[in-house]
Image: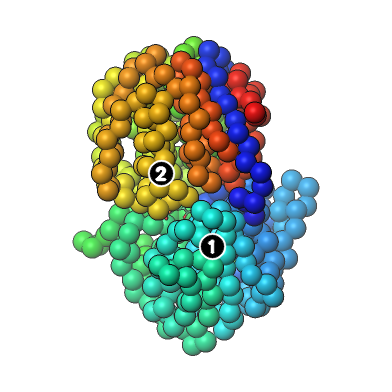
């Protein structure tokens, strides 16, 4: 559970070039799914490289509450699942802390079992919309009773006789897609999800790995995903790859902090996740993919990022948004150190993340001396060049890990550094951020 501790004010100072190797933690999306699919399988699933961040640990606790055994065994996590349809009713409220992925995927995977569960989370999660998940779950026969506007705390009454569903996603969201697919596991027949824009496809890939039958077709209306219901999922051995969304922070720091060269090894470049790296290269960043290879069916590379002081603003293609949706806050920081404007459109989803990320970053950047324009689904950062950002202020992080990390990276390159009012949310996704950045030479301190 996050958001219950004392705030941790932090400061980053500039004038410290970064060098060395940054081994970032396991992928958050794949870690949640490993625990959930392990819990829905028969047998023993072993997971190595699991992200031990608060979000994922909350999902582990939730899987225990639904009846799975989840234990850490040395470097591995071991899950004894209950099988599809085997969840028991939790005895208490499920607290998903800060995690939208956790709560939405778990709602999906219990929604077609004849059990009731009540979900809550921290102040950030309690302010986020759940109707995007409970509306399609209602088509299976699931009922949801939440606060006004479909907010947590919320009670989900699972469908006793679920029917399969066909649903076209109204928003590009892997969380919504995944909730529906996980609900479809315990429904008869075929559950179909159509997405106009491709979002991260870890659920589809991993469901196949666990033995479900999932077909994906490219049709005029978009990507059509067809799941055959009521499979027997078989336990797996999973090696979680490193998280490209966490890699983004040391990579971008290497690009904007003068004199830096940083190596970030073993990063998955699944095309549904790698949009930031393409954008950075278009901006003129010195970012090289070394040792390109394939692991577990996914492209992987070692990323080498160097400062070159030659960044220019770009227009990010809106169709790329889903593949870098979590990376816009750190991209806005890089954009501040580029020459000219960086234009980001088609990014309405940023307003309903752990915080309103356009608003949070626009305020922080303006306070640091950078001009930002914004609209409902777009924003423009007017770059000030490699040495042009003043900084010297304290940004509000709003229980949002990516805002906290982005503002600290800004401080590593801004003339007067940068503070944040609360660095504690970083532990939700990147618990080793401080030591890892410190190991590269960054000057980061707690007040
Ligand atoms: C995630 C999907 C994304 C992303 C989140 C993780 C997932 O959310 O922002 O950090 O693991 O499915 P949306 O699907 O709502 O865009």
Tell me the mark number nearer the camera, choosing from 1 and 2.
Answer: 2
Quarter where residue 170 is shown: bottom left
Q: Nearer the viewer, residue 105 or 196?
A: 105
Q: Which residue is mark 2?
A: 357
Whether 158 is drawn above or below 367: the answer is below
Direction from residue 65 to residue 26 in the image, left or right: left
Q: Residue 411 location, x and y as percent?
A: 50, 24
Residue 359, which numbered label?
none
Measuring 69% from the left and 66% from the top, which residue is drawn there?
64
Outermost residue toward the right in this view: 74
Numbered circles on residues, count:
2
Q: Residue 84 location, x and y as percent?
A: 58, 74
Q: Residues within 10 Å of mark 1 (few under 14, many from 20)?
A: many
Quarter where residue 358 is shown: top left
Q: Residue 396 location, x and y as percent?
A: 49, 38
Q: Which residue is mark 1?
A: 103
- Could you tell me which secondary element the residue under label 1 belongs to? helix
Measuring 78% from the left and 52% from the top, which residue is drawn there?
73
Direction from residue 415 to residue 64 in the image, left or right: right
Q: Nearer the viewer, residue 46 or 401?
A: 401
In space, the residues marked 1 and 2 are separated at their CA atoms by 20 Å
**In which quadrant of the rendered image does the N terminus lie?**
bottom right
- Could you tell me which secondary element the residue under label 2 belongs to? helix
Q: Answer yes or no: is residue 206 visible.
A: no
Q: Nearer the viewer, residue 389 or 112?
A: 389
Q: Earlier in the sequence, mark 1 or mark 2?
A: 1
Q: Residues within 10 Å of mark 2 (few under 14, many from 20)?
A: many
Measuring 49% from the left and 63% from the top, which residue is drawn there?
104
């Amino acid at each position: 559970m996050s958001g219950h501790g004392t705030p941790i004010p932090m400061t980053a100072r500039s004038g410290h070039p970064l060098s060395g190797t940054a081994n970032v933690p396991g992928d958050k999306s794949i870690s949640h799914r490993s625990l959930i699919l392990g819990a829905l399988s028969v047998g023993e699933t072993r997971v190595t490289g699991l992200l031990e961040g608060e979000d994922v640990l909350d999902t582990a606790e939730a899987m225990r509450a639904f009846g799975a055994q989840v234990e850490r065994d040395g470097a591995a996590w071991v899950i004894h699942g209950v099988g599809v349809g085997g969840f028991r009713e939790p005895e208490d409220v499920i607290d998903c802390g800060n995690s939208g992925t956790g709560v939405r995927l778990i709602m999906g995977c219990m929604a077609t079992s004849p059990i009731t569960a009540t979900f809550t989370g921290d102040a950030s999660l309690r302010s986020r919309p759940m109707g995007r998940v409970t509306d399609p779950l209602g088509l299976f026969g699931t009922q949801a009773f939440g606060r006004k506007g479909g907010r947590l705390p919320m009670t989900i009454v699972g469908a006793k006789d679920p029917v399969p569903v066909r649903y076209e996603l109204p928003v590009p969201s892997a969380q919504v897609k995944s909730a529906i697919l996980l609900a479809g596991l315990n429904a008869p027949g075929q559950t179909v999800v159509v997405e106009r824009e491709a979002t991260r496809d870890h659920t589809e890939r991993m469901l196949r790995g666990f033995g479900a039958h999932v077909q994906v077709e490219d049709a005029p209306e978009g990507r059509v995903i067809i799941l055959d219901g009521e499979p027997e999922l078989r336990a797996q051995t999973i090696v979680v790859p490193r998280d490209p969304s966490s890699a983004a922070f040391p990579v971008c720091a290497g690009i904007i902090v003068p004199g830096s060269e940083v190596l970030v090894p073993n990063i998955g470049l699944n095309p549904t996740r790698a949009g930031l790296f393409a954008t950075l290269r278009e901006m003129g960043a010195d970012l090289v993919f070394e040792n390109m290879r394939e692991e577990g069916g996914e492209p992987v590379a070692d990323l080498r990022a160097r400062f070159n002081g030659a960044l220019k603003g770009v227009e990010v293609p809106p169709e790329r948004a889903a593949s870098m949706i979590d990376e816009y806050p750190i991209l806005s920081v890089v954009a501040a150190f580029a020459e000219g404007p960086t234009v980001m459109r088609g990014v309405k989803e940023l307003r309903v993340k752990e915080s309103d990320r356009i608003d949070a970053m626009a305020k922080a950047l303006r306070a640091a001396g950078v001009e930002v324009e914004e609209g409902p689904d777009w924003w423009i950062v007017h770059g000030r060049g490699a040495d042009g950002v003043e900084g010297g202020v304290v940004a509000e992080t709003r229980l949002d890990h990516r805002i906290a990390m982005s503002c600290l990276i800004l401080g590593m390159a801004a003339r007067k550094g940068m503070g944040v009012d609360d660095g504690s949310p970083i532990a939700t996704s990147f618990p080793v951020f401080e030591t890892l950045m410190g190991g590269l030479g960054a000057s980061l301190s707690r007040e």
